[in-house]
Amino acid sequence: MADDNQLENQGLKHFLLTPNIDEYIFISLIAASFVGEIIMEASLFIAFIYWLAITPFFFIASILSEKAKCLRTGRKTAHLIRYELFYWGSAFIAVILVFFLWDFDRIKPSEASIFIHIILAHTMFLTGIVLGFRFYLIGILLFITAALNITSAYSLNFSLDLVFIALITWLGLKIKSQFILPILKRESDFTKDSEMYSGEERRNS
């Protein structure tokens, strides 16, 4: 059993040391968001179920992103799991409450899917405080697509979604600095020693 666990840990470590793993995680989150938009165009009920199911995926991707950074730099973000559980645990509770609203016929699947969409956008944006610029971007993308779903006709909405998804993807792959929102990242809240880890490493990665 111990040997199996060791092999699994080595396999995970090897995966997280894959070159450009951050870009792969970022693109997978963008792809998950894009799939959600496509499903919303086809069926609001299925979209509701999709956004409900995708919440744990966002949480796992957040953890893997920071673990990969830790392996490369040797710098560990203290209390990472605790903070991520606060973020995503509260998000999941909010999602479950939205599910109950739908189950008791207080809202329709269309409203439920939008509510969950907004909850995930807010949580992903807050995750950027710990995990960096790309998570801010995904949160912003989810906010934009939620707003478009609320205000735009379906045909126009899908075209605008493609434009913003392409723009956010380009920014996430090309911009290497956190110059837009550095003030939101308070190093002393998330590291054991703020002098040891000034934050420059993340902003330049």
Image (cartoon, helix red, strand yellow):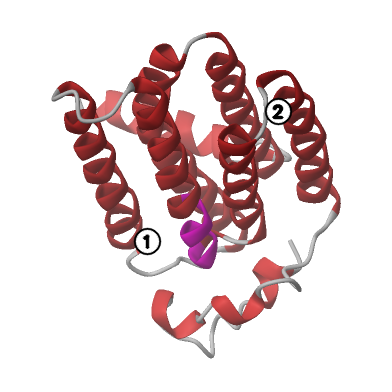
Q: CA distance from mark 2 to mark 1?
A: 36 Å
Q: Position of residue 110 (x, y in %)?
A: 42, 24
Point out the residue furthest to the bottom here.
195
Residue 85 horizontal side relative to residue 54, left or right: left
The amino acid on which the numbered mark 2 sits, given as a three-letter code, is: Asn
Residue of label 2: 157
Which residue appears farthest toward the left when viewing the image? Answer: 104
- Residue under the point 48% across and 39% down: 61
Please state which of residues 86 and 91 is positioned toward the viewer in this rendering.
91
Specify start and end residues of the magenta stretch as a single range. Answer: 124-130
- 129 vs 194, nearest the viewer: 129
Residue 4 sits in which quadrant? top left
Question: Is the magenta region chiefly helix, strand or loop?
Answer: helix
Disc 1 packing (10 Å; few <14; some 14–19; many ≥20): some
Left-right relation of 187 to 138: left
Say which mark, if any, is on residue 80. Answer: 1
Count of marks overlaid on the render: 2
Work out whether mark 2 precedes mark 1 in sequence or the reverse, and give the earlier one. 1
Of residues 115 and 174, the one nearer the viewer is: 115
Instruction: Measuring from the top left, give residue 186's x and y in whole percent.
Output: 50, 81
Pinpoint residue 70: horizontal percent, then vertical percent.
Answer: 52, 58
> Is 198 rendered above or below residue 125?
below
Q: Given this view, does label 2 or label 1 mark the residue nearer the observer?
A: 2
Locate the C terminus and report the quarter of the image it occupies: bottom right
